[in-house]
Structure formats: C-alpha cells, structure tokens
Image (cartoon, rainbow, N blue to C red):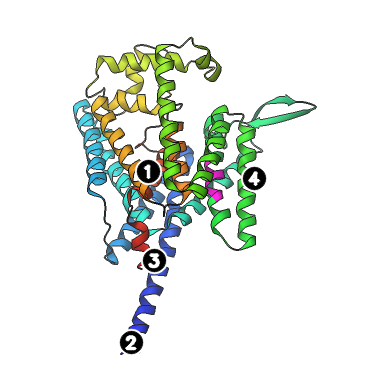
C-alpha cells in the first residue's frame, strides 16, 4: 500500500516537473514571438509563435485540471479594462481593431494569470535576462550614430537593436536585462551559473551606458537601489520606495504642466515633452469622462501639437479611456502595491521591474495594458504580484 502511494507520488512529481519544463520553454517561445513583432519580415511568424505558445500553455493547464485562484478584484478590474476598450471600438466602428480585441483580451488574461501560475518567477526572470542580454549583445556593434568625448577617449553609442528601438528603448531593454540578471546571480548556488548571469549583467550595464539615454541611466540607478532594498529590507521597504518614487513622478508631471519654464523642469527635460504634455491635457479637457477611444491619441493630440504622441503612458491612457479608464488603472495599480507590500515571497526583481515600468511610462507613451515589449513586462510583473497565493500553491506541488 505504502509502496503504491510512493510510486504514485513519484509519478505525479515527475509529471509536474515535465509540465513545468514544457511551460518554461513555451514562455521562452512567447517572449521570442513578442520581440519579433518589431521586425516586419517576421511579423506573421511572431503572431504564430505567440498564439501557439499561449494555446499550448492553456492546454497543459486545463489537461492537468490545475485551478488558478485569481483574486476577484484583479479579475474584475482586468475585465472592466477590456470591456472599456471594446466599448470604444464599437463606438468608433473600427471593425479591424474590433476583430483584434478578443486576441488582445486572451493574451492579457493569459499573461496575467496562466503563465505566472505555472512558471516560477525566477525562471521567467532568468529567461528575460538571457533574451534581453542577447538583444544587447547583437545591438552593440550595430547602428553607431555618433560619438562623445570622455577625457582622452572617444566612446561610441548605439541607437537600438538593429533599428527596432530608439536610444531610450534600447537603454530600457538593457536596464531590464540588468535587473533580471540580478535574480540569477543571487538565487543560484552554482558558481558557473553565477558567472554567466554576471556576464549578462555587465553586458547590459555596458548597453545602458552606450545607449546615452539619461532615462535608462537614471532608471538603472533607481532600480539597483530598489532591488537592494527588497533583498535586504523586504517587500514593505521596497513598496515604500515605489510609492515614494511614483508620488515624486506625479508631482514632477504636475509641475511640468503648470510651470514648464521652471529650472527643475528645464534641467531634466531637454526636449519638447512639456509642450506635448500640455497639449495632452488640452485634449483630455475636451473629452474628460470617456476619452476619444482606443488608438485615437494621435488624432486627439494632432489638434493641439505637431507631434502626435503624448510621450506619457498615463496621459496616453487617459486620452483614450478618459477619467473612467484612469481611475480603473490607478485602482488596479494600488491593489497590486497592496499585495506586494504584504508578500515577501515575490522575487525583489519583480517588484523592481514593476516600479521601473511605471516610471518609464511617465516619459514614454507606453500603455500599461497594450502590446509590445514594455507593456508585456508590466503584465508579467502584475501577474506575479497579483497572484499572492502563487508561492503557497507551488510549494504544495
């Protein structure tokens, strides 16, 4: 009797291990598919890889009858955001975008709940550091767009990954690779593995420096401090830093809009973001409640300014979904911060990347629940933070 139970337990453990290995490789395939979105020749291949990997993950999940204990509030807010987008698309009679919405909702729910439940966050962090590290390696020798003098040395800097990103985008890829590699260095016992992740870390830091992006360099410093706080002082201290950083960023945004000529604004923002943000606020004031609709930000800002991008994810989201959408988004983020505050089991790199993505949205037009590399990072981090029961579930498998 005892022998049969032991065999059955061993068989179950082996099956779970095989499933986790399969899902980890599928997550890797999913990330590759998303990255290929930025290369037009591979767009069809990227969509096939994304759909294949997500469908297979869901199939494995359902086959093993594993229940995902999705927090009700998170599930509700995610569905409301999706319904809000669908409402806008119907109102705009944009049939092409409307056909894409079911796929968008499917990807959002899958990334938020299914992948985080099935794959440990450390494995996903390791995959991210390897993929993003390789992107930096391939980018370093390409697209040299200039040099700058440091003492007796002339240093070149790059414009992006084979033309996929601008300097800020490439710098952010390198920042994400650096922070995620911290997890590989800290969590692994093998010295060889530590050296491998340390090599990725050094390469990505070099990428940040060579990107010549002030945003990326600043976020790398903030990220290193935030990660260290999470490692040595726990998630509550890390959450406090995140709340303080977001509060400071909101105050700076208000200062920029109200006093664009102030010394602080001029010293930090050297381009036309103050004018863009002011134009975005003017556009929001015309339709403050429900906004202009999904994908309509360029048209909305075009009436007030020559550049048709707000270069601020929160303003971008508000232009499209109005104050209703912004209030839902803020509620969602506050709920996640509450869960991060009480959960010491989450890898500090997840909280750090979540923070950096939120800060990045203040200076770039990334929509938090959109499509692409940076929105994907936000969604993955939201999934791991939101599923506060994830560690307990894994430990019982």
Q: Is residue 335 magenta?
A: no
User: Magenta: predominant secondary structure element?
Assistant: helix
As drawn, the label of residue 180 is none
Q: Are marks 3 and 4 in contact (CB under 8 Å)?
A: no
Check disc 3 and report the residue beneath it: 19
**Residue carrying label 1:** 379
> Outermost residue toward the top?
261
Query: Label 4 belongs to which residue?
Result: 202
Quarter placement of the C terminus? bottom left
Residues drawn in magenta = 176-182
> Can you say whether 232 is above or below 169 in the image?
below
Q: CA distance from mark 3 to mark 4?
A: 33 Å
User: How packed is label 1: few (under 14 Cα within 10 Å), some, or many (20 or more)?
Assistant: many
Task: Looking at the picture, tell me which residue is in the foreground, 115 or 350.
Answer: 350
Provide the secondary structure element on which disc 2 rests: helix
- Magenta stretch contains residue 181: yes
Question: What is the CA distance from the residue labelled 2 to the residue labelled 1?
Answer: 42 Å
**Lower position in the chain sequence, tag 2 or tag 4:** 2
Callout 4: helix, strand or loop? helix
| Image coordinates for residue 316, horizontal then vertical, percent | 35, 25
């Amino acid at each position: 009797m005892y022998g049969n139970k032991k065999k059955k337990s061993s068989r179950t453990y082996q099956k779970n291990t095989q499933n986790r290995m399969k899902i980890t490789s599928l997550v890797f395939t999913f990330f590759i598919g998303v990255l290929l979105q930025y290369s037009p020749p591979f767009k069809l291949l990227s969509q096939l890889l994304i759909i294949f990997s997500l469908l297979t993950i869901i199939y494995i999940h359902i086959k093993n009858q594993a229940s995902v204990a999705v927090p009700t509030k998170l599930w509700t807010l995610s569905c409301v955001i999706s319904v809000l987008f669908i409402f806008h698309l119907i109102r705009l009679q944009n049939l092409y975008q409307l056909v894409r919405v079911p796929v968008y909702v499917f990807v959002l729910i899958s990334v938020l709940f299914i992948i985080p439940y099935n794959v440990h966050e450390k494995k996903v962090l390791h995959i991210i550091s390897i993929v993003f590290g390789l992107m930096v390696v391939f980018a370093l020798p390409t697209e040299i767009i200039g040099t700058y003098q440091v003492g007796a040395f002339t240093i070149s800097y790059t414009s992006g990954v084979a033309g996929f990103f601008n300097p800020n985008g490439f710098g952010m890829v390198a920042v994400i690779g650096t922070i995620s590699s911290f997890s590989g260095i800290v969590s692994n016992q093998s010295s060889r593995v530590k050296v491998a992740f340390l090599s990725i870390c050094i390469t990505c830091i070099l990428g940040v420096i060579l990107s010549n992006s002030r945003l990326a360099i600043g976020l790398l410093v903030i990220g290193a401090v935030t990660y260290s706080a999470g490692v040595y002082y726990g998630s509550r201290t890390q959450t406090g830093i995140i709340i303080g950083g977001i509060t400071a960023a909101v105050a700076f945004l208000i200062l920029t809009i109200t006093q664009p000529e102030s010394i602080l604004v001029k010293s930090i923002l050297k381009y036309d973001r103050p004018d863009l943000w002011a134009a975005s606020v003017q556009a929001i004031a015309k339709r403050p409640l429900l906004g202009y609709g999904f994908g309509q930000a360029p048209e909305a800002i075009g009436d007030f300014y020559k550049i048709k991008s707000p270069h601020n994810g929160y303003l971008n989201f508000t232009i499209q979904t109005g104050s209703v959408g912004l209030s839902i988004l803020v509620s969602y983020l506050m709920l996640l911060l509450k869960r991060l505050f009480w959960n010491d089991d989450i890898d500090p790199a997840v909280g750090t990347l979540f923070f950096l993505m939120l800060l990045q949205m203040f200076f770039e037009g990334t929509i938090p629940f959109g499509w692409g590399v940076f929105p994907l990072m936000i969604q993955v981090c939201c999934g791991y933070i939101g599923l506060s029961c994830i560690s307990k579930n894994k430990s019982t498998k």
